[in-house]
Amino acid sequence: TKITFPNVWTNTCCSHPLHGMDPHEVDSPHDVSEGKVLGAMHGAVRKLEHELGIPRGELDVDMEGGGGGGDFKFLTRVHYWAADTVTHGEDSPWGEHEIDYILFVTVSSKDVLTLQPHPDEVDDIRWVSKKQLMDMFDDKTLLFSPWFRIIANRWLIGDKNGSGENDVVVGGGGKGRTVVGGWW
């Protein structure tokens, strides 16, 4: 079980870029200002393989041809701080204080990705529509990570009157729950 925010629905994974990795995973301030965060994208590919079992070759991190990032789209960074009071109580010594890179990957169908979740990382995955995700947020029996609520409300749900025709994969369980997002 994860130490912070176990048993909650959350984003697919966090890239957690590391120094000394090959390929390089750390971006410079200039890279970020230019929107070319190849390092964070490489970190995301590593973590997608570790947490969801998506093989490295299934997602493209090609910055050539306009610097688009291949399958990845970099939106921004988000700075947040959250204590894990649900798991550890009101005086929790555990929490997170991070700057997260918000990356999205669009796929034509859920069938184009190999998903073999790591049992120590993910207990469940759901592929849901925008409306179903909104309904999940309304269900008071479900818990969500604070950063995922920020991401979902700002970039996934946005216009609550939108069609919601595309899907998002949502996962969950005792170790950690995950979301792979769509509809942009």
Image: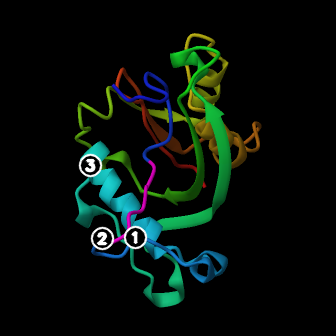
Q: How many marks?
A: 3
Per the image, the residue denoted by label 1 is 25
Callout 2 touching callout 1 (CB < 8 Å): yes
Query: Dominant secondary structure of the magenta stretch?
Result: loop
Q: Is residue 71 visible?
A: no
Q: Is residue 178 above or below residue 181?
A: above
Q: Residue at x 43, y 55 (%)?
A: 16
Q: CA distance from mark 2 to mark 3?
A: 15 Å
Q: Position of residue 107 (x, y in %)?
A: 42, 56
What x and y, as percent, mark residue 152? 64, 41
Residue in the foreground of this view, choosing between 80 and 164: 80
Span shown in magenta: 14-21
| Mark nearer the viewer, 3 or 1 | 1
Residue plotted at (53% across, 87% down): 66
**Is 157 left or right of 121, judged from the image as shown?**
right
Label 3 is placed on what type of residue?
His
From this viewpoint, is residue 102 visible?
yes
Left or right relative to 59: residue 132: right
Q: CA distance from mark 2 to mark 1?
A: 6 Å
Task: Say which residue label 3 marks.
Answer: 50
Residue found 30% across the figure and 70% down from its top:
21
Mark 1 crowd level (few <14, some 14–19, many ≥20, 10 Å Cα): many
- First along the sequence among labels 2 and 3: 2
How packed mark 2 is, by other alpha carbons closer than 10 Å (few <14, some 14-19, many 20 or more), is few
Q: Amino acid at mark 1?
A: Glu
Question: What residue did someone put label 2 on?
Answer: 21
Q: Residue furthest bottom?
A: 65
In screen coordinates, is 10 left or right of 130? left
Q: Residue 136: say if magenta.
A: no
User: How many residues crowd around disc 3 within 10 Å: few (fewer than 14), some, or many (20 or more)?
Assistant: some
| Amino acid type for the residue under numbered disc 2 | Met
Quadrant of the rendered image containing residue 122: top left
